[in-house]
């Protein structure tokens, strides 16, 4: 039950201190570009912002015209939100970390057994394209537990009629495809920005989607 409670944490439960909120407007404002990512890590826990660490720095470096930003993408967008510009948002499939390494600097990490972390790593990193294709029942159950929370958070945001949703990484795409009612907007799969995937030549099939992301980001932040 503990793992289920952890994955279902909504900010009011036992694991609320490990939950990183999405970067979306409270209500009323339309999002034109939505990035859907995996889960928080070390720097996200420290700052309380998604994409606040190395992956966020790489993402903003890719999207920035100069390629030399002074911040990570999450904190950069948080500043835009603070100035009432909510057109770009970030949602994590899991608002709590899926890797035990995320708690390397944490004095009191969540009380999960090693087998739980191994299970979450399988769910996070497996190349299965659908939840049904995950290799074990427990892995399928764990991935499925994340669906209601993600659906509820998506239902709580306003996407403009011409919004584009960028789905970053295989785990995110797999989970998105399993939602009961995903937003009916243009959805473009892209790699996760960690480890420089947005600039690696191995992602040739995603180059047009990444170019579209870069173009839309420039339009909304110029």
Image: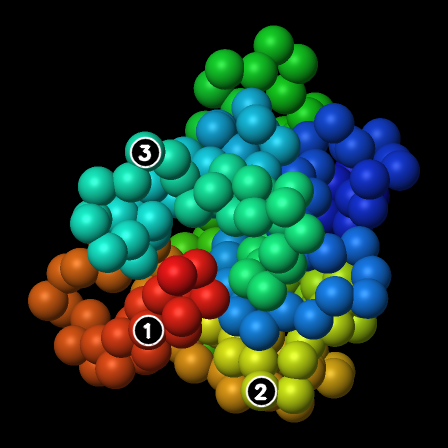
User: Which residue is disc 2 drawn over?
Assistant: 162
- Residue 46 picture quarter: top right
- Left or right: residue 78 versus residue 27 is left
**x and y, in percent, of residue 185 in the image:** 60, 87
- State if disc 3 and disc 2 touch (CB < 8 Å): no
**x and y, in percent, of residue 167 in the image:** 47, 71
Query: What residue sits 62% from the left and 32% below the top?
Result: 48
**x and y, in percent, of residue 8 in the image:** 78, 50
How dense is the environment of label 1, judged by Cα within 10 Å: few (below 14), some, or many (20 and up)? few
Secondary structure of residue under mark 2 = strand
**Residue 170 in view in this figure:** no
Secondary structure of residue under mark 3 = loop
Secondary structure of residue under mark 1 = helix
- Residue 97 picture quarter: top right
User: Which residue is disc 1 drawn over?
Assistant: 215
Chain-order first, disc 2 or disc 3: 3
User: Which residue is disc 3 drawn over?
Assistant: 70
Query: The C terminus is located in which quarter?
Result: bottom left
Query: What residue sits 56% from the left and 41% below the top?
Result: 79
**x and y, in percent, of residue 36 in the image:** 54, 63
């Amino acid at each position: 039950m503990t793992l289920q409670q952890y994955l279902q944490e909504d900010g009011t439960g036992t694991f609320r201190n490990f939950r990183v909120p999405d970067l979306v407007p409270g209500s009323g404002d339309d999002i034109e570009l939505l990035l859907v990512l995996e889960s928080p890590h070390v720097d996200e826990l420290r700052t309380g912002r998604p994409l606040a660490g190395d992956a966020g720095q790489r993402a903003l470096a890719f999207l920035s015209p100069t390629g030399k930003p002074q911040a990570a993408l999450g904190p950069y967008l948080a500043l835009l939100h603070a100035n009432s510009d909510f057109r770009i948002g970030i949602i994590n499939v899991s608002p709590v970390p899926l890797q035990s390494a995320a708690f390397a600097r944490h004095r009191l990490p969540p009380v999960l057994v090693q087998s739980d972390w191994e299970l979450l790593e399988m769910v996070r990193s497996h190349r299965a394209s659908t939840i049904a294709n995950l290799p074990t029942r427990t892995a399928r159950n764990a991935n499925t537990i994340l669906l209601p929370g993600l659906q509820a958070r998506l239902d709580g945001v306003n996407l403009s009629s011409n919004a584009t949703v960028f789905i970053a990484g295989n785990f995110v795409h797999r989970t998105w495809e399993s939602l009961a009612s995903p937003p009916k907007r243009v959805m473009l799969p892209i790699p996760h920005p960690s480890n420089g995937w947005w600039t690696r030549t191995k992602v040739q099939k995603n180059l047009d989607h990444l170019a579209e992301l870069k173009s839309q980001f420039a339009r909304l932040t110029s």
